[in-house]
Image (cartoon, rainbow, N blue to C red):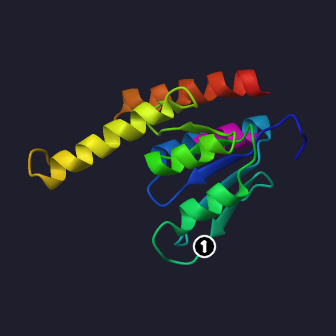
Amino acid sequence: MSEAAPCIWVDADACPGAIKEVLFRAAQRRHLHTRLVANHAMRVPRSPFIRLIQVPSGFDAADDYIAEQVSPGDLVITADVPLADRIVAAGAIGLNPRGTLYTKETVREHLNRRDFMEEMRSAGLASGGPSALDKRQVQAFANALDRFLATAL
């Protein structure tokens, strides 16, 4: 991979299929090295740009692998806010499957919101997680990815 092109890392265990499809098309179209990290096997297109990295099962095994391998300027696709905090500290950018960027300026706010909601759930004052991904959010993700790639490439 050249110095100019970032690598795209995907926290793939929980990444929605529609988001993976957007990433697969972008990887092929722009010749981007895209690494899906998961603790179980999954299908990925045959491509010199797309690779599945299977890590052992275990709490945060995929997150730890991504955090150890990411380089400044890389993009990490994750809904995991603690992972986003780790990769931003390493100089990378995070992108949530709903199209929200995690940067040095925003990740702390997202982490605080996540911790607050965790406290609310523990106290029985809130339940559940985010709603299912819809077409509008997939489009928001694709637009955010395009904006990132336009500035990074």
Q: Is residue 45 above or below residue 28?
A: below
Pick the residue in front: 25 or 93.
93
Looking at the image, the residue that sits furthest to the right is 2
Magenta residue span: 23-28
> Residue 127 at what x, y percent from top left?
14, 49
Name the residue located 57 percent from the left edge and 49 percent from the top edge. Answer: 86
Identify the residue at horizontal 77%, vertical 39% (top origin). Answer: 6
**Left or right: 150 with respect to 126?**
right
Taking the image as shown, residue 35 lies to the left or right of residue 49, namely left
User: From the viewer's perspective, is 113 left or right of 97?
Assistant: left
The residue at 65%/26% (across/down) is 148
Front residue of 49/108: it is 108
* Nearer-the-camera pick, 21 or 57: 57
State the predominant SS element of the stretch in magenta. Answer: helix
Q: Quadrant of residue 47?
A: bottom right
Image coordinates of residue 118 in percent, x first then y, are: 25, 49
Indicate the position of residue 100 as horizontal and vertical percent values. Answer: 47, 30
Q: Secondary structure at mark 1?
A: loop
Mark 1 surroundings within 10 Å by alpha-carbon count, few (fewer than 14), some (14 through 19), many (20 or more): some
Q: Is residue 33 above or below residue 63?
A: above
Write down the residue under mark 1. Answer: 55
Q: Position of residue 22 (x, y in %)?
A: 57, 39
Q: Does 49 sit left or right of 77 as displayed?
A: right
Residue at 72%, 22% (x, y): give it.
150
The stretch drawn in magenta includes residue 22: no
Type of amino acid under label 1: Val
Q: Residue furthest left?
A: 124
Compared with 146, 20 (above or below) is: below
- Can residue 128 be seen here? The reply is no
